Image: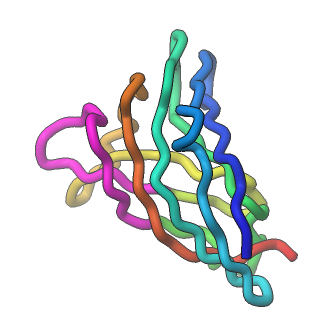
């Protein structure tokens, strides 16, 4: 068990700075299974372009038939996205980051544009590489 300081990055360009004092998340690792949870906030952004990524405490596994990939619903506050869409945290294999996307039935609508004052709450489990 432990904590890590969540780092935010943008998929294409720009910078995102996390709110000091609201950038720490917790994890519990049992074997290769990792459960993470936290409540984090963005302090400032500068010319953000692309998908918003948050760091993970351990890299995700690379298993047969993409079985280590996953997604989970998250709670947001002040995050701007279209009505009828839901924010989701999504991870791929062999990655140390998760991406924030918005989705609705039969549609991956893209991603919300990060802004100062956005809050994200999450709790999900994934398989770690080691």
Give coordinates of residue 62: x percent, y percent: 77, 71
Give coordinates of residue 30: x percent, y percent: 74, 88
Give coordinates of residue 48: x percent, y percent: 51, 18
Q: Residue at 74%, 54% (x, y): give it.
A: 96
- Is residue 33 visible in the rendered structure shown here? yes
Q: Residue at 25%, 58% (x, y): give it.
A: 106
Q: Check if residue 79 falls in the magenta segment.
A: yes
Task: Please report the bounds of the magenta region as a residue range.
Answer: 72-89
In the depicted structure, whether residue 30 falls above or below residue 25: below
In the depicted structure, whether residue 33 falls above or below residue 20: below
Number of numbered discs: 0
Q: Is residue 121 left or right of residue 55?
A: left
- Between 7 and 98, the one nearer to me in the picture: 7
- Between 9 and 29, the one nearer to me in the picture: 29
* Quadrant assignment for the C terminus: bottom right
Q: How is the image coloured?
A: rainbow
Furthest-right residue in this view: 130
In the depicted structure, whether residue 76 falls above or below residue 67: above
Furthest-left residue in this view: 83
């Amino acid at each position: 068990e432990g904590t890590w300081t969540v780092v935010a990055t943008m998929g294409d360009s720009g910078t995102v700075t996390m709110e000091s004092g609201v950038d720490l998340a917790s994890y519990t690792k049992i074997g290769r299974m990792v459960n993470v949870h936290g409540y984090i906030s963005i302090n400032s952004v500068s010319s953000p372009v692309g998908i918003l990524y948050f760091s993970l405490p351990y890299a995700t596994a690379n298993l047969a038939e993409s079985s280590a990939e996953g997604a989970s619903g998250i709670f947001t506050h002040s995050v701007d996205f279209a009505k009828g869409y839901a924010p989701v945290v999504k991870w791929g294999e062999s990655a140390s980051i998760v991406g924030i996307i918005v989705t609705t039935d039969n549609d991956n609508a893209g991603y919300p544009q990060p802004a100062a004052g956005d809050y994200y709450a999450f709790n999900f489990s994934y398989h770690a590489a080691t």
